[in-house]
Image: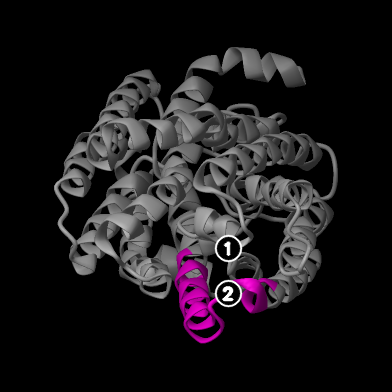
Amino acid sequence: MSYLGELRRNVRPLVAASLGVGTSLPLFAYTNSIFAPHLIKAFGWSRAEFALIGLTMLIMLPFLPIIGRWTDRFGVRRVALIGSLLIMPGFIGYSLMGGNLYVYFALFTFVLIIGSMTGTLVYTRVVAESFTQARGLALTIVNCAPAAFAAPLLPLLNMLIEDIGWRMSYVLLGALCCICGLIAVALVPKTSGQIVDPNASSETVASPVEATTRDDYRIILAAPLFWLILIATFLCLLQTQLHSSQMNLMLIDQGLTTQTAANVASIYVLGTLIGRVACGLALDRFSTPLVTFFSMIIPAVGFAILGTSFDAFTVIAVAMFLVGLSVGAETDIMPFIVARYFKMRIYNTTLGLHMIAAFLASAAGALGVSYTLARYDSFEPFLFVIAGSIVVGSTLFLLMPKARDYPKIG
């Protein structure tokens, strides 16, 4: 089957995964930063206090492998259905908040857990098991969905908050995500979880219950490649808080207004779209380690620019565009790497463990941001630290096996 023919044959699982991921956890990373300035103004929280929101990622750690294992055992449809139904109560909770920061932290954690059940951890399995030749491009399409939703939504959401208030805006956003999530679940093929790489004869279908959970974790954790990817991912994703909950605050710190910051956020989203398409196409054609290295290292330049004293609108827009180019690619790369080096039988279990590194990095980054703001009242010192960590992490990815016929783990 041809490259494009594989895409045409699997339109339904591709649309299901794109709609599910596009209105779940990855989208919230964009929308959180839009609500942040309004919440801080409404409740009088300090920026340093608010930056600690990233520590909620630590509570997520035990849930990620559980969600991944559930998906391997029970399938995408069941896990995603639960997530889609439970997301609305989280957003209603946001709308009812008082000024207690810990209540916000608790609600944020709940939304993180539920959002993970409809995010890339779950839905990328639909793509990984349906595609072989065009897997990189298919993952790109899925992971472009949040950015495609966010590009028009961010400025509109900011105007909506200023017009009807952040409380009602939370409710409307939650309703949108719930409805789209249920549609996505309905589109997931009923055979999902039973078919493994239909175009590849080298990997047979295996029931997830044939091996015990302990055996599978032992196989994964004993692989040096797993730890290499985990460490590299951690170093590259220390930046997470700077382009999620802290992005608008960071841009306002550069001298922009809330609306101008929202407009720059749209430019950043455009960068994620371009970066993801380029990365996905490259992954299908070129060496995985090289593509990963070049894709992940680009934000180092953008963060270094933001750390300088150049604060003209054009300079900031270009820097955020560069950050977006690679941040967009990272969500394509992690599922692709897992499908490339690990067998499909343990795909979600492995991806869940790798996402622990992402959440740990986010929590560590939150501490770094909070400390920097408390001591320097500026993001600039942390921006240079992040640029350095990205360079080191990106270089580690070059140590991954380059051979196309590298035997899969598991």
Whether residue 108 is visible to the viewer of this picture, yes or no, is yes
Q: Is the magenta stretch mostly helix, strand or loop?
A: helix
Marks 2 and 1: CB-CB under 8 Å? yes
Q: What residue type is labelled 2?
A: Ser
What scheme was used to colour the molecule? one colour
Quick check: 10 above or below 59?
A: above
Residue holding disc 1: 253
Q: Which amino acid does label 1 sit on?
A: Asp
Quick check: 232 above or below 173?
A: below
What's drawn in magenta, residue-wise?
A: 359-383
Whether residue 1 is visible to the viewer of this picture, yes or no, is no
Q: How crowded is mark 2: few (under 14 residues within 10 Å), some or many (20 or more)?
A: some
Task: Judge from the rendering whether residue 352 lies leftward or rightward of residue 388; answer left or right.
Answer: left
**Residue located 61% across and 36% down the image:** 139
Q: Which of the 4 image quadrants contains residue 178?
A: top left
* Image quadrant containing the C terminus: bottom right
Q: Distance between the residues labelled 2 and 1?
A: 7 Å
Q: Name the foreground residue: 285 vs 171.
A: 171
Quick check: 35 above or below 250?
A: above
Does label 2 or label 1 sit earlier along the sequence? 1
Task: Judge from the rendering whether residue 298 lies leftward or rightward of residue 155; answer left or right.
Answer: right
Name of the residue lying farthest toward the bottom = 375
Residue holding disc 2: 378
Residue 377 lies in magenta, yes or no? yes
Q: Name the foreground residue: 151 vs 4.
A: 151
Residue 12 lies in magenta, yes or no? no
